[in-house]
Structure formats: structure tokens, C-alpha cells
Amino acid sequence: MRPRRRHGLALLVLLAGCGEAGSPAAPSPTPTPALDLEPLRAAARASGRRVGAAVQAGLLRAGPDYAAVAARHFDHVTAEFEMKWGPIERQPGQRSYEAADEIVAFAEAHGMGVKGHALVWHGDSPAWLEGLSIPELRIALEDHIRTTVGRYRGRVFAWDVVNEAIADGRPGLRDTLFLRRLGPGYVAEAFRLAREADPDVLLVYNDYGGEGLGRKSDDVYDLVRGLVEEGAPIGGVGLQMHLDAAGYPSAADIASNMRRLAALGLLVNVSEMDVRVARLPAEGRLEAQRRVYHDVVAVCLAEPGCHAVTFWGFTDRHSWIDSFFGPDDPLLFDESLRAKPAFFGVRDALEGR
Ligand code: XIL
């Protein structure tokens, strides 16, 4: 949780309320509480798309308002970190699924789907993998995927099987433990293992920085085209969409990228959307953010191959952005769970406006 400017904002409103001595305060627009708004999931259903958000088990447990907003507005959830290999298997063979089970149970109790995230990711894998030989790592990977996918078979509609395997700043695969020890074939192998554990779930490759067109986008495209051509059981691609309103891919480039991925026979989803605004002047940043959310969701609605939009959290009260990029307000609802212009941008796009 980052230190907030709440008091500063309150002071600002107070001062604004003072105005000229005796003059009535200008009515400040009061943002609408999330629970008073028509559910986004209804608009999404009408559009034929899914709309979801990353959630945390601890936050679902701790805050009734957080859980209520998630259940009201989203038709699916994804675990922000509870379904990753690291949190599941801190010690070899000692798997803990309690937190992941909580999220799945919450979803099922509220008629929501679950998008599994993420079976193989260098960003949160157990530390003990480093000490394994090549055969041991292969076995550990097989056991993890088979056990985890098998556990949620029929309860998860999609899995991010491999996450962020493409390198930044240079062509090719990211230099990870999996690549170094298992070779480039680890990607296809992970998909095959997941398919063996669940014959029906949508299997997805997920990455960031390749949402529009460019070198990394081309590398993601080449990777998934190769998987399709070799018959790996990949069914979808997740475009993470962690954007900065100060500079982001054009809607046209995102659309072109979605179209070429769909032409491979793959479903596309916006998998982790948030929109940073801290680099913009305070005046107008929320409107700029609204426009980015609107335009990206509108692209998904315009592209038949795009079937879902998932936000990486839904309230500025809890966003990974604060820890990884610095203080920001990247999501649809403010810290008091009131709708920001971004929410209305998403709603309008879902309603075709
Ligand atoms: C992030 C979570 O939001 C953080 O809470 C955690 O500390 C690190 O991982 N891309 C991904 C996500 O695929 O899994 C990452 O989630 C954000 C970047």
C-alpha cells in the first residue's frame, strides 16, 4: 500500500470550498461508488466479451467492499500471485493451494470464471529450482503443471501456460533458468503437459511489450506461430497491456496485431490492463486515462478474435504499479472504490459508444 496524498486532496477540496469569503463552494463532482453502478459484466455479456480483474485472496478475505465490487463488476477473476509456482511450492514437494482455492471458491460462489495465471514464469518460480539438474528440473516442471492444472480441471476456463518468455531489447527468448536448462523446447513442452492435465482448458501464451506492432510484438507472433505450426496445443495469446498514458501503442497497431494473431487461429485477450498517469500533468490525466481504457476496450470489441479484457486489479488502493513503477493511479476505481472516468471509458466501449 503506498503512502497516499489523501490529506492533500482533502485539503485541496477544503480550500476549493472556501472560495471568496462567504461564496458557496462550487459543487465538486462526487465520484459514484462502484456498488451503485450498473455492473460492467452486464455490458460485457451484451458485447460477447468477458471482463475480469486480478484479485488477491487476502484482500477478498479482509475487505467486504473489495469482494463486493469484484463480484458486481467482473465475470472472471485471475489470481494476482496465488496461482504462480513460487507461492504454491515454496519447498520442493510441499504444495500449498489454500489461497488459490479461496479465489476459485470466491469466483464459483459469484458465478464468475477463473483465468489461471501463470504456470511457468521466471518472475515468480521457487528458488530451489536453481539447484536442480536438468532431469530434475524437467520432472519438477512436469509435476507442477500436472498437479496444478489437474487440481483446477473444469474450474478454470484458461491458463497462462508460459508468461513473458520473450526477451526485452533483443530478439529471441528471455534468458531464464528454463531456457538455459531445458532449451527453447520448454515452451511447447509446458503447453503439452497442461493439455495432458486438462483436455478442454484454453491454453495461452502471455506477454507484455508486444501489444502493438514492433520487434517484440513480431517475436511474440513468431513464437506462437511456431507453436501452432508444430502442433503445440496453444489456443490463445494474452497481451498484458500495462500502458502509460504518456505514450502507448496506437489502437490501429493493437488491432493489426490482434488480427494477425487471430489469423493463426488463436484467441486474443487483453490480460493485465492498467494505465499509468503519473507522468502526465495532474490536470487532464484522468480524462487521458479514460481515453486509453476506452480505446483499447473498443479495439477488443472491434476484433472478433479478442474475447476478454482483464484488468490488473481494479482499485487504486491496491496496484502493483506503486511498488514497481512508483506512486500512480492506474485503475478503474479510486482508493475509496468510487468510479473514475476510466470506468466510464470501459463501460462506454463495452456498450459500443
Ligand atoms: C505481479 C503482481 O501484481 C505483484 O503483486 C507481484 O509482486 C509480482 O507480479 N506481469 C505479470 C504478472 O504477468 O504476474 C505480474 O504481477 C505483473 C507483470
Image (cartoon, helix red, strand yellow):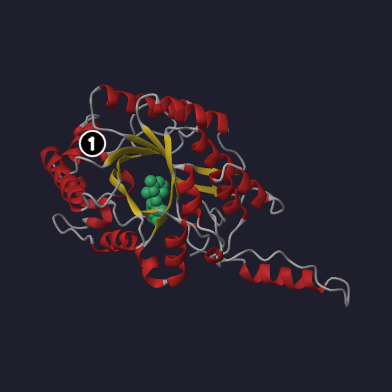
Specify whether tag 1 is near ligand 1 (CB below 8 Å). no
Residue at 76% across, 68% down = 27
Residue at (61% x, 48% y) in the render: 290
Q: Is residue 327 above or below residue 218?
A: below
For image coordinates 20% across by 41% down, the residue present is 194
Q: Is residue 332 above or below residue 165?
A: below
Q: In the drawing, does residue 352 fall left or right of residue 157?
A: right
In this view, the residue in front, 255 or 91, is 255
Tell me, yes or no, if residue 213 can be seen here: no
The location of residue 332, given as percent across then percent down, is 54, 55
Q: Residue at x 21, y 48 (%)?
A: 149
Q: Is residue 139 left or right of residue 129?
A: left
Nearest the viewer among 89 and 228 is 228
Residue placed furthest toward the bottom: 22
Tell me the element at label 1. Answer: helix
Q: Nearer the viewer, residue 343 or 238?
A: 343
The furthest residue to the front: 46
Q: Amino acid at mark 1?
A: Phe
Total of numbered circles in the picture?
A: 1
Classify mark 1: residues with Cα within 10 Å, few (<14), some (14-19) or many (20+).
Answer: many
Residue under label 1: 191
Note whether 106 is above or below 247 in the view shown: below
The reply, left or right, for residue 109 in relation to residue 135 is: right
Picture coordinates of residue 148 (x, y %)?
20, 51
| Residue 341 visible in rendering | yes
Q: Position of residue 32 (x, y in %)?
A: 61, 64
Where residue 342 appears, as percent x and y from the top left, is: 59, 52
Q: Considering the image in quadrants, where does the C terminus appear?
A: top right
Q: Quadrant of residue 251?
A: top right
In the displayed structure, does residue 238 sit left or right of residue 190? right
